[in-house]
Image (spheres, grey):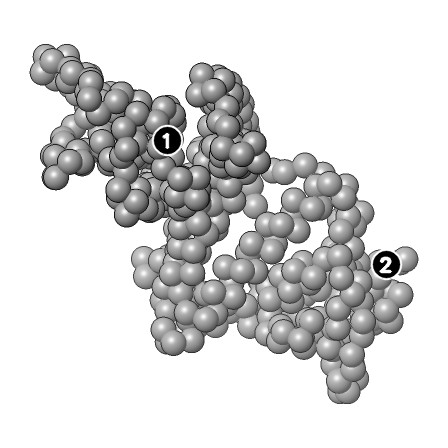
């Protein structure tokens, strides 16, 4: 939930609405800026406009799913919901249905749910007056939704026609002093499975190895026509230029341009859904391994702001020769972004849902004694300022990289 667009006005003393003249001026100014920006991008940067539109469409879908989870759980517990909003003010349109105002705003970069009494327990239907377990569910619902939504997104991605590499991975090189050399792997070995999971192509082989970092796992290979099993260890912090095991791999067959051959796949829904569930879980494990790797010495995270992610979205959309062919990779990108949003929102950082959950857990540990709302608000404000500074720095880095002709972040 986005704290910075919340109003914590008690139900008994509602904030008076702004005058129609002020709302009209704000709307006209905002509309003028949006129109000028869109026209300028359409003339001078049509590709950037398409990328930005796609990115905003995906982001808004993920954010609104997040906020809808807060909304429905709050409603289920009888919490008074003042407003459920698409975008940030100023407001374009609003309609009150029952006790809740549903609104659409000019800034399409998110959304928010405004609950009664989020910090002070004024009234039986205020958020702060609810039992700790109810507040925990409402706070965590958005992030949990972002972590479950990829199952649906991956499932749809698998049901649409999509390209996958053809041919198994072949070991083309082994670094000296690595786990692969110790295990007895040899150049020319064809990887059949990793930790019991069939590796049908180079992408799967690489992903399955990274899933088993920090473990000794079984690698099934075909060598000189014979199938053999090798136990190899996946390192947490390999030297630069090396993978967890110390091997380099390539597809069995490649096209004349050096790229792997691809085939078109399309799975029926009854196969796509369980595979999507496994893909979602695998992605979460890879995210965990990435974080563990930072502490093990693989270096810090590579950050990308909205500009960088929008560029990546455009590249994904343009990577396919047909519109239908772009649907699957865009759905996969949306699933990855959703998982990132879910994990990020669960981190115990000020301003995020995880930060508010952290304060709630402190309250539980203290036997129900709450931290003063004013102190908590200060912490969230400081976190919001820090977040803005980080966003500005990352966005500046994205723009500098684009101007310099650098590639998008992986």
Q: Which residue is rendered at x = 16% and y = 28% of the image?
A: 92
What crowding class fits label 2: few (fewer than 14 Cα within 10 Å), some (14-19), or many (20 or more)? many
Residue 367 coordinates in the image, percent (x, y): 54, 34
Q: Is residue 313 visible?
A: no
Residue labelled with disc 1: 128
Q: Nearer the viewer, residue 349 or 120?
A: 120
Q: Which residue is rendered at x = 68% and y = 71% of the image?
A: 194
**Residue extending furthest front?**
367
Residue 253 coordinates in the image, percent (x, y): 62, 73
Residue 308 coordinates in the image, percent (x, y): 48, 36
Numbered tag placed on residue 197 in the rendering: none
Which callout, 2 or 1, points to the residue nearer the camera?
1
Position of the N terminus, as image quadrant, is top left
Numbered tag placed on residue 178 in the rendering: 2
Could you tell me how far apart the alpha carbons at marks 2 and 1 are, in whole angstroms?
Answer: 55 Å
408, above or below 269, in the image: above
**Residue extending furthest bottom?**
226
90, above or below 178, in the image: above
Tag 2 secondary structure: loop
């Amino acid at each position: 939930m986005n704290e910075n667009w919340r109003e914590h006005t008690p139900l008994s003393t509602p904030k008076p609405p702004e005058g129609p003249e002020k709302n009209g001026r704000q709307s006209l100014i905002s509309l003028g800026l949006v129109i000028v920006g869109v026209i300028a991008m359409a003339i001078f940067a049509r590709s950037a406009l398409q990328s930005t539109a796609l990115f905003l469409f995906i982001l808004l879908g993920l954010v609104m799913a997040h906020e809808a989870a807060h909304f429905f759980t709050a409603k289920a517990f009888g919490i008074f919901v003042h407003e459920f909003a698409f975008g940030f003010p100023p407001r374009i349109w609003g309609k009150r249905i029952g006790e809740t105002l549903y609104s659409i705003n000019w800034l399409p970069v998110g959304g928010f749910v405004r609950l009664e009494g989020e910090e002070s327990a004024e009234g039986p239907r205020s958020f702060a007056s609810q039992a700790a377990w109810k507040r925990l569910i409402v706070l965590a619902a958005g992030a949990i939704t972002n972590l479950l939504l990829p199952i649906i997104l991956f499932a749809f991605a698998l049901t649409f026609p999509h390209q996958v590499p053809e041919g198994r991975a072949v070991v083309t090189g082994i670094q000296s002093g690595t786990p692969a050399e110790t295990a007895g792997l040899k150049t020319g070995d064809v990887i059949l499975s990793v930790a019991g999971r069939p590796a049908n192509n180079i992408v799967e082989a690489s992903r399955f190895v990274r899933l088993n970092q920090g473990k000794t796992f079984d690698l099934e290979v075909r060598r000189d026509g014979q199938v053999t099993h090798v136990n190899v260890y996946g390192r947490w912090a390999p030297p630069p230029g090396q993978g967890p095991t110390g091997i380099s791999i390539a597809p069995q067959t490649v096209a004349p341009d050096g790229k792997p051959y691809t085939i078109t796949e399309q799975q029926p829904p009854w196969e796509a859904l369980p595979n999507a569930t496994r893909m979602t879980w695998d992605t979460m494990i890879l995210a965990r391994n990435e974080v563990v790797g930072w502490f093990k010495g693989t270096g810090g995270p590579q950050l990308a702001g909205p500009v960088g992610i929008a560029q990546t979205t455009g590249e994904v959309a343009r990577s396919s020769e047909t519109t239908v062919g772009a649907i699957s990779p865009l759905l996969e990108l949306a699933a990855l972004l959703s998982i990132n949003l879910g994990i990020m929102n669960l981190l115990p950082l000020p301003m995020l849902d995880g930060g508010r959950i952290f304060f709630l857990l402190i309250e539980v540990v203290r036997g129900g004694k709450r931290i003063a709302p004013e102190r908590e608000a200060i912490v969230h404000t400081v976190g919001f300022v820090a977040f803005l500074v980080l966003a500005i720095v990352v966005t500046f880095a994205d723009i500098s990289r684009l101007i310099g002709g650098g590639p998008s972040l992986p």
